[in-house]
Image: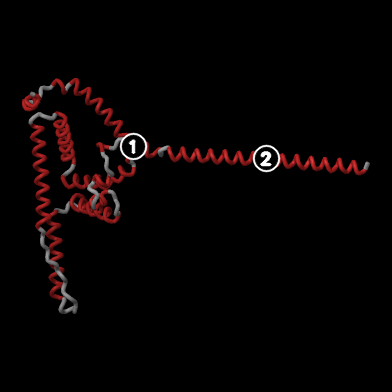
Amino acid sequence: MAEHEERKVEKSEEHEESVIEKIAETLHLSNNNHHSSSSSSDSDDDKKTASSPPVTSSFKSKVRRLFGRERPVHKVFGGGKPADVFLWRNKKISAGFLGGATAIWVLFEVVEYHFLTLLCHCLIVALAGLFLWSNASAFIHKSAPHIPEVHIPEKPVLEFATGLRNEINRAFAVLREIAAGRDLKMFLMVIGGLWILSVLGSCCDFLSLFYIIVVVLHTVPVLYEKYEDQIDSFAEKAFHELKKQYAVFDAKVLSKIPRGPLRDKKKA
């Protein structure tokens, strides 16, 4: 009897061990399946994120640039040293240029120093200092100052004169087209621009206007480059509204104005 009971106990223990092993195997399999499913879902998410384009790039592609611009702001300004100055690529040069313009404006507008007087005083100080240094160098046992020879090169002057001549001829051609009555839109734009310039000329003199232009060139481009997406989005909405208003104005007013004879001949 004792041996029979011991065998029953051993069989029950073996049965319990086998049940425990089966439970452990099922738990292990379920953990592996969960891990594989989570890894596959993670890989799917990664593929989706990789395949989907970034939001910023799609937003940038949808926004139309100001004035139909396709190049970066730096390239619009020529991509050279002037563009670096206007966009503050070299902060020392940009700050020095803006500071020099501010000093000139303060001298001539605030202090009311005249240009001819300033030029003569600067030449007097420079010539007197160099003259005294050249004559006193033998007594103070120092070398005489090296005064370089200054020559204006011919090639840059000719290039500048040629470019200026081409721009003047182009402006004359545009003025002729406007005066002939061929482009009413350009006529209105030029009249509006000249009127704005006349208002600015009555408010301030040429030097103040030049200083305002310098300040604008050193502030507006760099701010536009920093916030170009927001500015382009707002400008697109504003241009769309202006086009609608211009279409209404053209239908009610401009279309009823008779055109010039040159435009009629061109249509015929």
Residue at image mark 1: 61
Q: Position of residue 119 (x, y in %)?
A: 13, 58
Q: Position of residue 91 (x, y in %)?
A: 30, 54
Colour scheme in use: secondary structure
Q: Is residue 245 left or right of residue 162?
A: right
Residue at image mark 2: 27
For marks 2 and 1, the one nearer the N-term is 2
The answer to whether mark 2 and mark 1 are in CB contact below 8 A is no
Q: Secondary structure at mark 2?
A: helix
Residue in view at x 37 percent, y 39 percent:
57
From the image, which quarter does the C terminus lie in? Answer: top left
Residue in view at x 15 percent, y 76 percent:
136
Q: Position of residue 253 (x, y in %)?
A: 17, 21
Front label number (2 vs 1): 2
Near mark 1 (Cα within 10 A), the count class, few <14, some 14-19 or many ≥20, is: few
Q: Is residue 45 left or right of residue 176?
A: right
> Which residue is nearer to you in this view: 240 or 6?
6
Q: Secondary structure at mark 1?
A: helix
Q: Give the amino acid at mark 2.
A: Leu
From the image, which quarter does the N terminus lie in? Answer: top right
Give me the C-alpha separation between circle 2 and circle 1.
51 Å
> Which residue is nearer to you in this view: 130 or 84?
84
Residue in view at x 73 percent, y 42 percent:
21
Near mark 2 (Cα within 10 A), the count class, few <14, some 14-19 or many ≥20, is: few
The mark found on residue 256 in the picture is none
Number of marks present in the image shown:
2
- The image quadrant that residue 202 belongs to is top left
